[in-house]
Amino acid sequence: MICNMLPSRTVAILDKCTNCTRITHNYFDSINRIMGSEMLVPYFVSPHNQEGIMSAQPVDIQILGRTLRVNCPKEQQDALKSSAAELEQRLKDLKNRTGVTNTEQLIFIVALNICHELAQEKIKTQDYTDNMEQKIRVLQHTIEQALQEQARITGRTITPLE
């Protein structure tokens, strides 16, 4: 059964869900297969929320002169458009810097660069988290020592922090 909410030129695998047809995307051997001036796009989200109300609408974005139609919740459309603009700029910058004209090659290089940046940010975030956890442990230990000292002076029993 094909859900009537699917935009044209969408590629998807369909299976049943409680409200409509749940759509799981099928990746191809490249990011997207390019046909004519539009790309075939996997449908990333179910078009209905838990109550069966439409939650995603098709949004057309332009990348390197090609139209890409994706379904996106209304509240995330600005972020999608901003991301598309950044991707477009990265692709153009790489094309100008390297002289590479093969669109697929440009997309793969930019995708690898973005994945590398994401990996670096994950490492930084984990380092920051580890650092903050260590500082919290030191503060907790300092507070516990101060409470124990206060308890020794006043003669009251104080339970340790958790």
Image (spheres, rainbow, N blue to C red):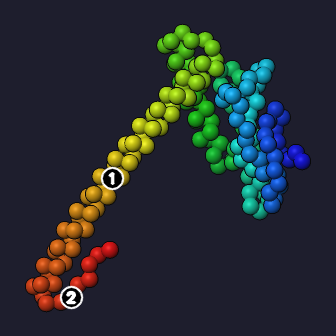
The amino acid at mark 1 is: Asp
Residue in front for this viewpoint, 45 or 57: 45
> Which residue is situated farthest in the top direction here?
99
- Determine crowd level at label 2: few under 14, some 14-19, many 20+ residues with C-alpha closer than 10 A: few
Asked whether the viewer can see residue 85, the reply is yes
Q: Residue at point 21% right, 71% down?
A: 143
Residue 45 drawn at (x, y percent): 71, 47
Q: Residue at point 52% right, 28% down?
A: 112
Asked whether the viewer can see residue 59, the reply is no
Name the residue that disc number 2 marks: 157
Earlier residue among tags 2 and 1:
1
Residue 63 drawn at (x, y percent): 65, 25
Q: CA distance from mark 2 to mark 1?
A: 32 Å
Residue 74 drawn at (x, y percent): 69, 47
Location of the C terminus by quadrant is bottom left
Residue in front for this viewpoint, 61 or 119: 119
Q: How many marks?
A: 2
- Helix, strand, or loop for circle 2? loop
- Helix, strand, or loop for circle 1? helix
> Which residue is situated farthest in the right direction here?
1
Q: Residue at point 52% right, 18% down?
A: 94
Name the residue that disc number 1 marks: 130
Residue 150 drawn at (x, y percent): 14, 81
Q: Residue at point 18% right, 89% down?
A: 156
- Residue 11 falls left or right of residue 98: right
- Residue 109 falls left or right of residue 142: right
For residue 159, above or below residue 60: below
